[in-house]
Image (cartoon, grey):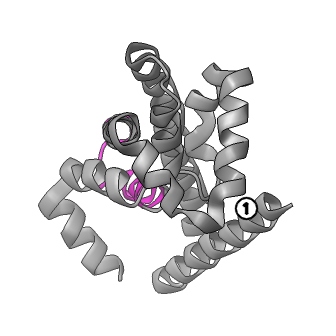
Amino acid sequence: MADELTRWLIEYGYWAVFLGSMIEGETAAFLSGIAAHKQWLSYPLTMLFAALGGVVSDNVLFFVGRFAGARILPRFQKHQAKIERVQQLIQSHENWIIIGIRFAYGMRTIGPIIIGASKVNPIKFFILNVIGGIIWGCSIVSIGYFISSIVFALPFHPHLSWLVIGLVIVGLAILIRKKWRR
């Protein structure tokens, strides 16, 4: 796996970080942080491209919500309670929701659509989305960077280090999911 990831990152570099952050989000940004730690990519540029990917995807989804949200949101019948809750929060905490929606488990894709459907000012959304994207890109890439620096410093075989990182990712996902459900 490490050899394949190395080849992929060397071949596509920052485009992989950018597109991965747009499509897959946290996983791509986290893995990019590992690549930066391994010095396959520049740490500051990795944070920048992860943030850009997050900002671009959220802006696209915002405009999908702005122009088609009324038709799209009712299709998410099993998530209507969450959608209504986010809409209420937008009314009372618009700025914080725009900045932080990308950190809410399960809301990474639908969150910007809900915000767009709520008729938030596009310029305001763009500015706050850039702030949120920078915070998100820097923090998720940094988490990957620092966790990998700890794991790769342990006296393991390199392949075992990748297994430990995989287990950390799964453990964090389970923990976040349980916390979100509460």
Residue drawn at the location 65% of the way across and 57% of the way down: 80
Quadrant of the image occupied by residue 48 = top left
Quadrant where the C terminus sits is bottom right
Question: Which residue corresponds to mark 1?
Answer: 176
Percent of width and height locating residue 69: 43, 44
Residue drawn at the location 33% of the way across and 36% of the way down: 67
Front residue of 141/52: it is: 52
Residue drawn at the location 39% of the way across and 61% of the way down: 24
First to last magenta residue range: 28-46
Percent of width and height locating residue 58: 40, 40
Q: Is residue 74 above or below residue 158?
A: above
Q: Is residue 63 visible?
A: yes
Residue 29 is left or right of residue 179, and the answer is left
Residue 91 is left or right of residue 39, and the answer is right
Q: Is residue 32 magenta?
A: yes
Q: Is residue 91 above or below residue 24?
A: above
Q: Secondary structure at mark 1?
A: helix
